[in-house]
Structure formats: structure tokens, C-alpha cells
Image (cartoon, rainbow, N blue to C red):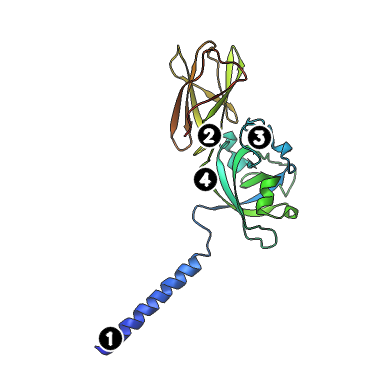
Amino acid sequence: MAANRTWGFFFMVKLLSLCLIFRLTGSQSPPAYWNAAHATFYGDMNGTETMMGACGYGDLIKQGYGLETTALSTALFNNGLTCGACFEIRCYDSVQWCLNDTIIVTATNFCPPNYSKPEGNWCNPPLQHFDLSQPMFRKIAVYRAGIVPVLYRRVPCVKSGGVKFKINGNQYWILILVYNVAAAGEVVDVKIKGSSTSWIQMSRNWGQNWQTSANLIGQSLSFQVTTSDGKMVQSDDVAPADWKFGGVYEGRQF
């Protein structure tokens, strides 16, 4: 009986030791839901070249995105539907070039492919690539690296204030830029309603610019915005009846 208890004691010690080893070795693996990609940068430290990107946001400083932004390769851009999504990125697997920091950036631009060169085309499909603003790149890697391997994952966007709607166009055509979207960030559907109409389906023109040919001049405007996670926020009477082209109006937030 004493021998059995002794054997049982050593068995439990061995089992606990194996569990501890498994936990220690397992901790060296990347966290779940991280994906591998590469990152470069474009523009200077002032971020001038990052403005007026393919998502249509225009002046990123004025719109609240700042320089915490990135352009996406074809594989990630999804023809502009990923505009507004937020990514957490960190450099990895390069002791020489990586810095011990993590960044969160919003997708605001497109890194176009170049099929004329046989190699070094990081934004060509099917590669997943981030072309960061220079200030963001230098938070995670040494400037001289130029390009580094990274790990990335989607994260909820944190924005100040409500969803914003900038009204462009003319009396025959209305173009709405939807921006400053929190949570999922990427808008997949927009509906508009005048005070004298029912809900009207808008179509995406480019980036996060949504259009309709309905004549809504002189009516207050409401919006339904749906993001990629299926959530919808309705903002009633966001723009008053005397709204102006070029005006920016603020609705509810996710």
C-alpha cells in the first residue's frame, strides 16, 4: 500500500511537471487570431502624402484619423469595403529591426499593385501588406529597415463623437461620405431617408462615399448605417431641412 501511494505521488508530480512544460513552451507561440504580413511606410513624418487617399476621407487630420493610418494591399483592401477598419500591428521575427511596441491604425488608403516588376511588389495579390504612415512604422520598427514582417489582427475602432456624414453632389445627385465610424469601422450598407420619403437604398460609389439620385433638397435627412459585423445604427433627422452641400452632420455612434 505504501509503495502504491509513493508511485501515485511521483506520477502526480510528473504529470504536473509535464503540464508546466507545456504551458511554458506554448506561451512562445503567437497569440490566437494574429495573422502574418509585411509592412512598409510611405510619406514623411508630417504625413502629407497620406492625405486624400482611396477611401475618400480627405484631410485625415481634420477628419479625426490623424497619422494613425495605413494603406492596404489588394488582398486586404477588398475594393474599398475595408476602408475604416482598424488593425493592431506589431513587428516580429526580426531582432535587428523590430521595436517593442504595438500600434492601432485605421485603413484609409490603397497600396496599388505593380505587375510590371518581377519582384519586390509587396502590394500585389495575394500578399497581405500594410503601407503605414511613417510615424506609425517608426513606432514598431527601425526606420532603416524599410520593410519588416508583422503580425496583425482586426480590433474595434475607438472614435470620438458620432458617425459623421459629409454631403457632396448637386440637385440631381447626392454623395455622402460616411466617416468616424467606431466598433467594426467598415461600412457595408447605407440607407437615406428624407422627411417626405421612405428609406432609400444608397450604392457605394468609391471608398466610403455612398450615392443616390433622389432629390432630397429641402428635406431633413436620416441615415441607417450598417457595418461588417451586421450591426445597424439609425440616426434620425441628422441634417436639418436647410442642409448644405459641403456640410458635415453628426449622427449616433456604434
As measured in the structure, the alpha-carbon distance from the residue carrying label 2 to the one carrying label 4 is 13 Å
**The residue tagged with tag 1: helix, strand or loop?**
helix
Q: Earlier in the sequence, mark 2 or mark 4?
A: 4
Report the amino acid beneath label 3: Ile
Asked whether the beta carbons under mark 3 and mark 2 sit within 8 Å of each other, the answer is no
Residue in view at x 49 percent, y 55 percent: 32
The part of the image, by quadrant, that contains residue 97 is bottom right
Residue in view at x 71 percent, y 55 percent: 142
Q: With 192 as the anchor, is 126 left or right in this view?
A: right
> Residue beneath label 3, please?
61
Q: Earlier in the sequence, mark 1 or mark 3?
A: 1
Residue 168 in picture, x, y percent from top left: 61, 20
As measured in the structure, the alpha-carbon distance from the residue carrying label 3 to the one carrying label 2 is 15 Å
Residue 234 in picture, x, y percent from top left: 44, 26
> Residue beneath label 2, please?
181
The part of the image, by quadrant, that contains residue 113 is top right
Report the amino acid beneath label 1: Asn
Which callout, 3 or 2, points to the residue nearer the camera? 3
As measured in the structure, the alpha-carbon distance from the residue carrying label 4 to the one carrying label 3 is 21 Å
Locate the N terminus and report the quarter of the image it occupies.
bottom left
The disc label shown at residue 155, or none:
4
Asked whether the beta carbons under mark 1 and mark 3 sit within 8 Å of each other, the answer is no
Asked whether the beta carbons under mark 1 and mark 4 sit within 8 Å of each other, the answer is no
Report the amino acid beneath label 2: Val
Which callout, 4 or 3, points to the residue nearer the camera? 3
**The residue tagged with tag 3: helix, strand or loop?**
loop
Q: Nearer the viewer, residue 249 or 112?
A: 249
Q: Residues within 10 Å of mark 4 (few under 14, many from 20)?
A: some
Q: Is residue 123 visible?
A: no
Residue 66 in picture, x, y percent from top left: 64, 38
